[in-house]
Image: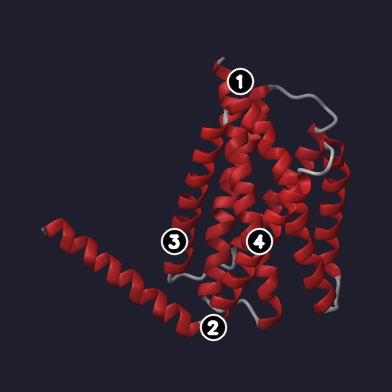
């Protein structure tokens, strides 16, 4: 009974907090709607991928990276938003072939379990970010620096073979990085640092946080499997 009362108090405290957070930042609802729509585009992309050959993966990966870079510099909000909506569709195609690889290596049940675990982790990280009274805007520059380093190493290692352990470490660092990015992004929403013009961009940030968490958790498990086989 005591435990039930504690859970009930925690539930109402959390529920009350989100009512307060929503009242303080009306963009939260808009961001989550765009986030959900991006997943609809991802599902469409995954369906289209079943009609395409695997050889499309590399060109699409390059196109997606280029679009991400362009979206950062385009001044037209309408054009930038169009690009940011194209990315989840392309990611859906890439995600289909990525998951097919891990299903072949790890099995369908384990991949599904990792997806469910990623959803749970993402929700917990979102709660942490939204419930933090401290504004962690100063994390941004540090996280971005680590992100650039990870991207550079990942690109280099596409052409230079590395050991399984090195690849495992990079995947682990990437999981930690996007875990922190998830907390950071929700904290930015919590402290009203997202303007109307940045709603779609923030939704894309959250989408990419989730995708990177999911894919790199799969990578960590696959590398661990290879390490101990």
Point out the frontmost of discs 2 and 3: 2
Count neighbours of disc 2 (C-alpha within 10 A) and say few if under 14, some if 14 to 19, many if 20 or more. few
Residue at horizontal 72 percent and vertical 56 percent from the top: 44
Q: Earlier in the sequence, mark 2 or mark 4?
A: 2
Q: Secondary structure at mark 2?
A: loop
Point out the frontmost of discs 3 and 1: 1
Q: Secondary structure at mark 4?
A: helix
Point out the frontmost of discs 1 and 4: 4
Residue assigned mark 3 = 128
Q: Position of residue 57 (x, y in %)?
A: 82, 41
Residue assigned mark 4 = 40
Q: Position of residue 64 (x, y in %)?
A: 82, 53
Residue assigned mark 2 = 26
Q: Position of residue 87 (x, y in %)?
A: 77, 59
User: Looking at the rendering, which quadrant does residue 10 occupy?
Assistant: bottom left
Q: CA distance from mark 2 to mark 4?
A: 23 Å
Q: Position of residue 42 (x, y in %)?
A: 69, 56
Q: Earlier in the sequence, mark 1 or mark 4?
A: 4
* Mark 2 vs 4: CB contact within 8 A: no
Residue at horizontal 22 percent and vertical 66 percent from the top: 8
Count neighbours of disc 4 (C-alpha within 10 A) and say few if under 14, some if 14 to 19, many if 20 or more. some
- In the rendered image, the residue lying farthest to the front is 51
């Amino acid at each position: 009974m005591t435990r039930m009362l504690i859970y009930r108090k925690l539930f109402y405290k959390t529920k009350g907090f989100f009512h307060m957070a929503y009242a303080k930042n009306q963009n939260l609802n808009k961001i989550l709607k765009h986030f959900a729509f991006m997943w609809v585009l991802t599902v469409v992309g995954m369906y289209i991928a079943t009609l395409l050959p695997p050889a499309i993966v590399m060109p699409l990966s390059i196109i997606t990276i280029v679009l991400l870079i362009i979206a950062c510099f385009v001044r037209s909000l309408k054009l930038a938003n169009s690009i940011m909506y194209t990315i989840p569709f392309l990611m859906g195609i890439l995600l289909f072939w990525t998951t097919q690889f891990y299903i072949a290596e790890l099995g369908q049940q384990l991949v599904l379990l990792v997806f469910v675990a990623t959803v749970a982790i993402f929700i917990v990280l979102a709660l942490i970010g939204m419930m933090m009274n401290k504004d962690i805007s100063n994390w941004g520059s540090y996280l971005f620096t680590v992100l650039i380093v990870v991207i550079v190493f990942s690109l280099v290692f596409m052409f230079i073979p590395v050991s399984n352990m090195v690849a495992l470490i990079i995947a682990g660092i990437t999981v930690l990085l996007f875990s922190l990015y998830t907390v950071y992004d929700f904290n930015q929403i919590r402290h009203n640092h997202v303007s109307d013009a940045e709603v779609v961009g923030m939704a894309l940030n959250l989408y990419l946080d989730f995708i990177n968490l999911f894919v790199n958790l799969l990578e960590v498990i696959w590398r661990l499997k290879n390490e101990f086989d």
